[in-house]
Image: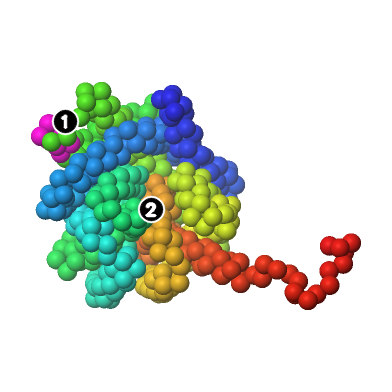
Amino acid sequence: MSHRKKFYEKFKEAAMSVIPIVVIVLALSLTVVPVSPDLLLSFLLGAVLLTIGMGLFSVGSEVSMTQIGTQIGSHLTKTKNLKLILAVSLLLGIAITVAEPDLQVLAANVPNINTLVLIVTVAIGVGLFLMASMLRILFNIPLRWLLMALYVVVFLLAFLTDPDYLSVAFDSGGVTTGPMTVPFILALGIGVASIRSDEKAQMDSFGLVALCSIGPILAVLILSFIYKNAPDTAVSSILPSHETTLGLGRYYLESLPTYIFEVVIALLPIIVFFLVFHFVSLKLRKIQFLRIMLGLLVTCAGLILFLLAVNVGFSSLGHVLGQKLAEPHLKFLLIPIAMIMGWFIINAEPAVAVLNKQVEELSAGAISAKAMNYSLAIAISIANGLAMLRVITGMNIMWIIVPGYAVSLLLAFFVPQTFTAIAFDSGGVASGPLTATFMLPFAMGASTMIGGNIMTDAFGLVALVAMMPLLSVQLMGLIYVIKTRKAQETVEIPYAEDEIIELWEV
């Protein structure tokens, strides 16, 4: 594929992700939920910047992050040095997570926890569990039993932790499996899996993302026992009002240096690590090296535009819409509108099409991509509806998360192992950029208007969205198992041996 065509495809995917939300927001703003013109204009400008930013980020990370992961993973396999593999996995897991855009958006929105503290905690959790993932691949440890044991520990800690940390912890697991982390982790895992010579080695590279999303949950739960007495300040998501378009444009430009600094600091560890690894060990060809460096530059530009658009345009309007829809005379619309948004967001998510095709191929056509798409869209729509129900009622997230994960882990013993691995990996597919950037501020705005606790009622939305594919993908796997068994039980010869067959009736 030519570079021009690749750019076109990535920008098209980004636009298809953003357009449904823009249409829904415009429909709401022009009918039941009027907003100020400057806020709507800021949102539309943010939508354009977000599309450009996501497109650049996708192209850049594919050229740089995926290549770095593949090259380092491949090189590590040749050394067959376990200590080196684990050390590199830890360092790279931390570095790549710090730069994850969805995590930065979540951390910026969380009151009561310092942004840097939360990012570093989550990054360490990912790094440690990336090490654990490498050990699982190398020693062929069954995924389902490992997931079972780890989630038992997660829920034991969850029942003991501060309620204000609970929803944030599960959300952290959802946002780390984003567009920066997933391609890199998968590339690293496939490289390391090649050390093993058995036929199941490549299959064991599935499940990496599932394990790496548990690390942040445990890390934040542990943080709740250590990090106390943080200032109780809500995060301001509201854009200052502007009388003219010049004032709005100036506000965007004035905000730009802040995000340039944040992105450079976030990407610097990855760049330094790659440069050291290249000159000491990799020694890539000049054209390869320059291509990766150019990819990092494009990734940096895309991430800057992404964060600028989200923080200045998208989050602000999401917060305001949530507030207005939570007013007493409109509260009945909160759940159905959130469900509609969930349906369109997941249908527009580019990675969903890849997941659906993967399941269709895995099931040899027994589960079509179309059926998989509908099941996933329904699941995410329900997740958004449940999130708004929590905002309205103040329901504890454990009442939903515990049964959901219990059923998911139970299903793991009735479906092929690959379905389980893909299901637990696909949480990152569902909890895409728009969930953290728009739906979470939407829930926060609604919770503020109702007078609820943002930490316990609004946060948890990303966690619910990340949990639902665990159920939907494995349910599709269960359907596949049932269909396969029925096909095997079907009698191939429809006539008995002594039966007279009238040829003109055949």
Packing grade of label 1 (10 A; few <14, some 14-19, many >=20) is: few
- Quadrant holding the N terminus: top left
Circles 2 and 1: CB atoms closer than 8 Å: no
Q: Secondary structure at mark 1?
A: loop
The stretch drawn in magenta includes residue 124: no
- Quadrant holding the C terminus: bottom right
The image quarter containing residue 14 is top left
The stretch drawn in magenta includes residue 279: yes
Q: Tell me if residue 162 comes above or below residue 124 in the rendering.
A: below
Q: Tell me if residue 466 comes above or below residue 75 in the rendering.
A: below
Residue that mark 1 sits on: 283
Q: Tell me if residue 459 comes above or below residue 433 in the rendering.
A: below
Q: Main secondary structure of the magenta part?
A: helix
Residue lying farthest to the front in this orientation: 498
Identity of the residue drawn at 24% across and 50% down: 195
**77 displayed left or right of 410:** left
**145 displayed left or right of 367:** left
Identity of the residue drawn at 80% across and 75% down: 499
- Mark 2: amino acid: Gly
Q: Which residues are magenta?
A: 273-280
Q: Mark 2 against mark 1, which lies toward the viewer?
A: 1
Identity of the residue drawn at 17% across and 34% down: 282
Residue that mark 2 sits on: 428
Q: Secondary structure at mark 2?
A: helix
Tell me residue 360's x, y (percent): 53, 53
Tell me residue 486's x, y (percent): 60, 70
Tell me residue 134's x, y (percent): 23, 55
Q: Considering only order in the chain, which callout, 1 or 2, is on the residue closer to the N terminus? A: 1
Q: CA distance from mark 2 to mark 1?
A: 33 Å
